Amino acid sequence: MDALEKERDGADRIGADNLRENLAAYALGALEKDERLEIEALVCRDEAAAAELEEMLETLSLVSMRVGDGFPAPKLKDRLLERVEAEVNDSSVSDSTVLSNVIKHIEGALDESVSQQSPTALQRITGYLSAGRIALATSLSALVLVSVLAFQLSSDNAALNRKMRYMEREVSSATTLVSGLIDEVSQAEASLSRAEAKLSAQADEIKEMVTVNEALRSSMNDQISLTYATLRNEYQTPDWSLDSLHSSDAYVYLLEHHDQPLGALVVGGMSPAPTGKEYRLYLIGDESPIYAASFNMNEAGYSTVIFSLPSPLSSFNGAHITREAIDAPPDPGLAEPANRFVPR
Amino acid sequence: MNMTTIDYQNLTDQELAAEISERNIDAFTALYDRYGRRVFGLAARMLNDSASSEEVTQDVFLRVWRRAQSYTPTKGKFTTWLFRIAHNRTIDELRKRRRDRNRHSSDIAEHYDLESNEISPSEAVVSNSEYAQVRAAIHMLPPPQRRVVELSYFKGYTQTEIAAKTGQPLGTVKTRMRLALIKLRKALAEEIYGE
């Protein structure tokens, strides 16, 4: 124990000793309120002081009991018991009045039936009824407790009900929202179905168009073949071939007249020239390209052009087809070539 | 039917207290029959007023009825608890009277004089032997000690008031009170311990 603790312990002992000097005054009722509170605190923590005080109080209670006897008015007892019974009735639940009356009825009936036979039995029964009344009071206290618990449970239940109603509203809102979404999805599905049907129809149309196209192409080829065959009576076919095709689907036949300085160009499969433009044929020799003819594709997708040959085709190295503005003069520079032909 | 008769008069104080804490009016009635006169006697000795004493007695027993469950047998005898309530309630009444001297101008403080050897008519007809024993024990005290017991316990003065009233230092008053109680206990040992 260090010095500080010793000093504190010593001060506590002195304080306790001073307080213990007041134990007798406390027992005699001779302390002011603050002093009484100090003593009550002391005996709570000091068993020796508590025992000493108890001895003093015990002695004085004997003095009080024996200091004198008296004769209070008999009405005092009656008044006191009336007060006590009133408190019992007040402290019971109001419903106890009914039960109390039932007990009184039982008491009355028993009194009437038993008293004539056995007063002792009546006394016992009355004693039991008294005990029963106490049990009833206890039961009623339990009833009050149960009522409080029930009220608490009821409050909790009410809170749960409120929460459930709130959740029901939330679920209802969510259901409405989901229902709306389902409608929207149904509408979207219907739109999609319609679009699919439309696409399917368009695909069918495209197929039909392809079929038609194929038929047209076939027809065009037939027409070109027919034209070529017709021209073959007067024209010969040089041993030229396409060197490169800017229009992959093009069919091009270049012919030379047997007797006259004329050339013939049979073209199919090339797209029509854009508005304001036309195709132009140039023959390429040792010098700059020579303009030979202008043409465009007809509605059937082919064209046959007869043009003058400045010299036999054998004097040329090849031919070019360009796409040029209609109003522009021929461009030997071959600025916008379309197809080129070269001898084999 | 299996029934038993409860004779509350034969129950101990602690058993009655237990019954009262269970709101047993019959037990309460038995307790009043056992101690009502003594509580009234204490109040009457101190107050010298029958009506006030009855009022105090009624208050004391109502407190017992209402607080019986607060009595703890392990902490002391039931009578110590009961007469502590009775004494405190009577002291309160005395002090209230002292504060209200206009209504109670008579000198009630001098009513109960322990130094007097006279016995009132009521004392003469009740428990004379018991009373005589206590009175004898009090008379055995040295007068200064008897005086502080009289002024404090029976007249409701605080130790500070007694010091002022008697002109004695407060420490002396405290010492006298302590010694008086020690001597009283020794004198009443037979009553207390059954010796």
Image (tube, rainbow, N blue to C red):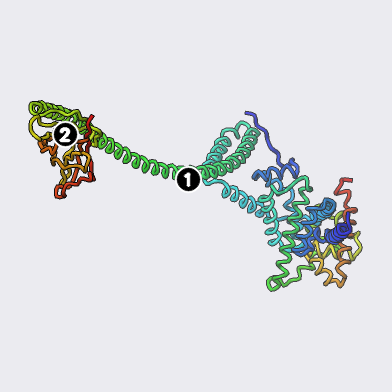
**Which residue lies at the image location 92% right of the left edge and 63% below the top edge?**
B142
Q: Mark 1 lies on which chain?
A: A
Q: Is mark 1 on a helix, strand or loop?
A: helix
Residue position marked by numbered label 2 in the rendering: A313
Residue B104 in the image: state x and y as whole percent. Answer: 70, 70
The reply, left or right, for residue A61 in relation to residue A86 is: right
Nearer-the-camera pick, A11 or B127: A11
Frontmost of labels 2 and 1 is: 2
Q: Which one is earlier in the sequence, the residue at label 2 or at label 1? A: 1
Q: Is residue A335 visible?
A: yes
Give the numbered dot on residue A159.
Answer: 1
Nearer-the-camera pick, A265 or B82: A265
Q: Which chain carries label 2?
A: A
Q: Is mark 2 on a helix, strand or loop?
A: helix
**Which residue lies at the image location 13% right of the left edge and 33% below the top edge?**
A266
Amino acid of disc 1:
Ala
* Quarter of the figure with the N terminus of chain B: top right
Give the numbered dot on residue A172.
Answer: none
